[in-house]
């Protein structure tokens, strides 16, 4: 049964609100997920769900009440609060009236990139949360084995990133790492580093990709940094047939991931 909380000064309320900030998510190793669908995916994927909040309207639907019974069976604590207080714990306007707090473990590259991995995505300072979430979701669909987010990228547990992943945050092996260790370990594991780069004559669909590929997608404004470019085995670009100067980072990554995947199946 849900425990009712009526005061906005309650410690559980204040703690949950604190997780809207990156520094607190990092310190506590926890993040917020919001919405009925992503909560059900979290359960399906056996995410480490710490506790759940619902607003006063959530239980009105039979499928929602059934889900709460499932949470009770799994001994996951549910708290209930007013719509007004609930809305202070989320960053969306149109809520479904449920959020969860999930525990995460920071992953090291050496321990989490196994020898069976053949397709890795490296994200170099991706800043936009929507781009980051869409790239994670697309990588999941394209069968990428691991995503490596380099220092300077947006926090993958940012609520906007989480929403954009549409649940793929629970399916993907996402690792934070420094550029130095990425270059060292990927070379040791015989990956070809393929970087998206405008100043090359290699069109992405005229290249034969090798057995193990690490695809680098660069910052939205500045592209892939110079050190990664100089350490790349292959540089590729996507042709622009119209007048646009460039493609969105998420769109570019999708085109390149699906092309490379054809060589790895």
Image (tube, rainbow, N blue to C red):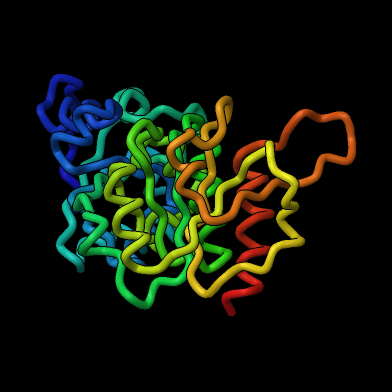
Q: Is residue 265 above or below residue 60?
A: below
Along the line of sight, the residue nearer the viewer: 5 or 154: 154
Along the line of sight, the residue nearer the viewer: 152 or 212: 212
Along the line of sight, the residue nearer the viewer: 9 or 230: 230
Residue at 39% across / 42% down in the picture?
Answer: 34
Residue at 58% across / 65% down in the picture?
Answer: 142
Residue 156, horizontal then vertical, whole percent? 37, 41
Residue at 20% across / 36% down in the picture?
Answer: 26
Question: Can residue 61 be seen in the rendering of this structure?
Answer: no
Residue furthest front as drawn: 230
Residue furthest left as drawn: 11
Dividing the picture into quadrants, the one containing residue 91 is top left
Residue furthest right as drawn: 242
Question: Can residue 22 be seen in the rendering of this structure?
Answer: yes
Along the line of sight, the residue nearer the viewer: 13 or 204: 204
Image quadrant in which the N terminus is located: bottom left
Tally of numbered discs? 0
Image quadrant in which the C terminus is located: bottom right
Residue 41, horizontal then vertical, whole percent? 40, 61
Dividing the picture into quadrants, the one containing residue 258 is bottom right
Viewed as shown, does residue 196 lie left or right of 112?
right
Residue 70, horizontal then vertical, whole percent? 28, 66
Viewed as shown, does residue 165 lie left or right of 45?
right
Dividing the picture into quadrants, the one containing residue 264 is bottom right
Residue at 26% across / 56% down in the picture?
Answer: 109
Residue 128, horizontal then vertical, whole percent? 51, 31
Q: Is residue 144 above or below residue 263?
A: above
Q: Is residue 265 above or below residue 207?
A: below
């Amino acid at each position: 049964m849900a425990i009712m909380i009526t005061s906005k000064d309650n410690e559980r309320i204040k703690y949950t609100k604190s997780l809207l900030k990156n520094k607190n998510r990092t310190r506590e190793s926890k993040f917020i997920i919001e919405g009925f669908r992503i909560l059900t995916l979290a359960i399906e994927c056996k995410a480490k769900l710490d506790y759940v909040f619902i607003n006063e309207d959530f239980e009105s639907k039979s499928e929602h009440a059934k889900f709460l019974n499932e949470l009770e069976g799994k001994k996951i604590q549910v708290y209930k609060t007013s719509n007004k207080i609930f809305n202070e714990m989320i960053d969306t306007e149109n809520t479904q009236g449920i959020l969860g707090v999930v525990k995460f473990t920071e992953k090291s590259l050496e321990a989490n990139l196994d020898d069976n991995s053949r397709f890795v995505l490296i994200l170099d300072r991706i800043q936009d949360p929507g781009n980051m979430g869409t790239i994670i979701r697309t990588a999941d669909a394209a069968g990428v084995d691991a995503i490596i987010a380099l220092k300077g990228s947006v926090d993958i547990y940012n609520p906007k990133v989480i929403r954009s992943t549409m649940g793929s945050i629970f399916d993907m092996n996402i690792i934070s790492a420094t550029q130095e260790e990425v270059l060292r370990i990927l070379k040791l594991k015989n990956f070809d580093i393929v970087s998206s780069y405008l100043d090359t004559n290699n069109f992405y669909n005229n290249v034969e990709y090798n057995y193990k590929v690490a695809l680098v997608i660069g910052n939205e404004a500045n592209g892939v940094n110079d050190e990664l470019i100089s350490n790349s085995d292959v540089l590729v670009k996507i042709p622009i047939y119209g007048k646009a100067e460039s493609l969105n980072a998420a769109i570019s990554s999708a085109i390149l991931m699906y092309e490379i995947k054809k060589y790895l199946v």
